[in-house]
Image (cartoon, rainbow, N blue to C red):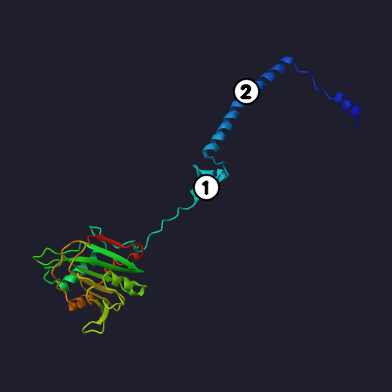
Amino acid sequence: MNDDDIKRMFERLDLGPEPPMAMIDDDLHRGHRRLRTRRPAGWTAGAAGTAVLATGVAVALPGGPGPEQELGYAGGVPAEASTSAPVPTPTPTGTATPSSPPDDRDGIPSPNTRQLLLDTAAEHFDPDRSHLPDETSNGGTGGAGDGLRVSTKLDWVVPGEDGLGMVEVAVTTPDYVSEEFALEDFAIHLGCELGTPACAERAIPGTDETAWVSDGSDADHVLTVMHERADGSLVGVRVSTLFGNNSLVPVSSVDIDLDQAFDFVTDPDLEVDPQEAKYEPSRVTATAGHD
């Protein structure tokens, strides 16, 4: 088909009369007015869409994904965090191991064990309670591996004298001696240097057991006896005529003999309180009160 054929085809079309110019002007006016009314509506929809994205609030369309899936956020929180099930808080089981042995009202460690040490000392050394105090005023704890040593220094008074003597008593948890140097440390603590003539192992009368005995390392030190029991625990006592940290004047004597000391260290009721034994001794060594 060439240009002439196309021209002949248009000549055969009946397009009717041309509309008057006034009608054309009216159509243009209506078109401009419609355009002006549609522009603000379009702008408002765009601004609202921008606000939706900025605040993270989405409107779910019918049949479409929910707001969290659409934008990935719900109220500013990621969808994964808002739709996942809450993680339950684990419930503790058992009793947590304290980092140090329990304290009494004065903040001194192992009050139950210290009181037992005092009561046992009074039973064997001072049944009339004329020399020893009614309660302990100091205490110390030490650890060897998983073991615990509890000790306290007790005033020893002689009625009518101004001086002050000392009776130091100590006990450990079972298996204490299984740790390297635990025995040596316990002995030094009570003034008994193992491996020297001043701290010799002796038989305990009436038994097949032994104890280490020191007859005194200085003028004030009267006696030390320490005993390892079958369960690996240690019990010891040190007797001095001067409580050096608390007095400048010694007492004339402390009437505790070797047999009484043997009875003390072999007393089967003397042990560390089970609740006070449940701590981590490697993390703390405490001493409180006056020495």
Q: Nearer the viewer, residue 288 or 249?
A: 249
Q: Nearer the viewer, residue 235 or 38?
A: 235
Residue 40: x %, y % from top left: 59, 26
Which amino acid, by three-letter code, is at mark 1? Ala
Q: Nearer the viewer, residue 226 or 272?
A: 226
> In terms of secondary structure, where does tag 2 sit?
helix
Quadrant where the C terminus sits is: bottom left
Query: Residue 177 vs residue 158: left or right?
Result: right
> In terms of secondary structure, where does tag 1 sit?
helix
Quarter of the image for residue 115 reads bottom left
Q: Nearer the viewer, mark 1 or mark 2?
A: 1
Position of 60 relative to 260 (above/below): above
Query: Residue 26 vs residue 278: left or right?
Result: right
Q: Nearer the viewer, residue 256 or 163?
A: 163
Q: Disc 1 marks which residue? A: 79
Q: Disc 2 marks which residue? A: 36
Question: Residue at (78%, 18%) from the top-left corner?
Answer: 18
Quadrant where the N terminus sits is: top right
Which amino acid, by three-letter code, is at mark 2? Arg
